[in-house]
Image (cartoon, helix red, strand yellow):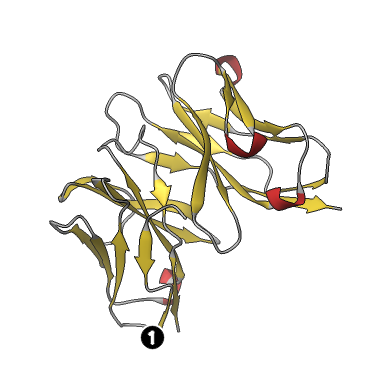
Amino acid sequence: AQSVTQPDIHITVSEGASLELRCNYSYGATPYLFWYVQSPGQGLQLLLKYFSGDTLVQGIKGFEAEFKRSQSSFNLRKPSVHWSDAAEYFCAVGAGGGGFKTIFGAGTRLFVKA
Amino acid sequence: DSGVTQTPKHLITATGQRVTLRCSPRSGDLSVYWYQQSLDQGLQFLIHYYNGEERAKGNILERFSAQQFPDLHSELNLSSLELGDSALYFCASSVGGSGSTDTQYFGPGTRLTVL
């Protein structure tokens, strides 16, 4: 069965520091992978997605993610964090080949300190 | 602003009651998805409608039901409410009918509090 694990419930980084949020998935075939961000009191917004091709994916707001099949990972990175990046981040996996569900991880809450 | 609207924004009700949450998808989107977000369960997929037809069901209780109308708006009905139903309910929409590959655009959510 598909599953998504985000090992870090929360992470604190200093403004200007680099960020990496971890995501591991479980799926038999090539997965469709997403990262969403949820700001307080808001709905989710898509940051980036990976379906195929180049394993390094660029997204909005300066984020990127790298798909590593051998590690079943899809970690999200940003070279320099801004205070406005404080939010909750969700990794998600969708079944390919006609599947109809997207499964979300539990989320990682990012705190940014000045 | 994603273009997906949800009403009401907040809802407070009592156990045993029934409520209806409403969602209007983005213009041109044919799919509507419903999710429940709670502290203990996280973000759980409930149900997906595409162009008026049910496409997929997730962890939706029998006390909950949904439909998508000809104008593509959707309603989620929650009945015999229990304290544990208190959560944020999100609606999302997408252009196509695949819940696994389409980019989903989320509404701001309806916060339901059951007292």
Question: In the shown orientation, is residue A62 left or right of residue A101?
Answer: right
Can residue B10 be spotted in the picture? yes
In the drawing, does residue A83 fall left or right of residue B50?
A: right
Where does the image place residue A114, in percent across and percent down from the top left? Answer: 87, 53
Q: Please determine whether, in this image, residue B4 is positioned above or below residue A50.
A: below
- On screen, residue A29 versus residue B80, left or right, reads right
Residue drawn 42% across and 57% down?
Answer: B107
Q: Chain of mark 1?
A: B
Q: Position of residue A111 (x, y in %)?
A: 75, 52
Q: Is residue A104 above or below residue B112?
A: above
Furthest-left residue in view?
B70
The front one of A77 and A83 is: A83
Q: Quadrant of residue B18?
A: bottom left
Give the residue number, with chain letter if any, for mark 1: B14
Q: Residue at x 42, y 21 (%)?
A: A28
The answer to whether one can see residue A2 in this image is: no
- Are there few (<14), some (14-19), or many (20+) residues within 10 Å of tag 1? few
Percent position (x, y) of residue B99?
A: 32, 39
Residue A32 is situated, as x and y percent measured from the top left of the image, at 43, 27
* Residue at x 27%, y 46% (from the top left corner): B29
Q: Which residue is at 45% across, 84% downward?
A: B115
Badge count: 1
Which amino acid is tagged 1? Ala
Mark 1: which secondary structure? Answer: loop
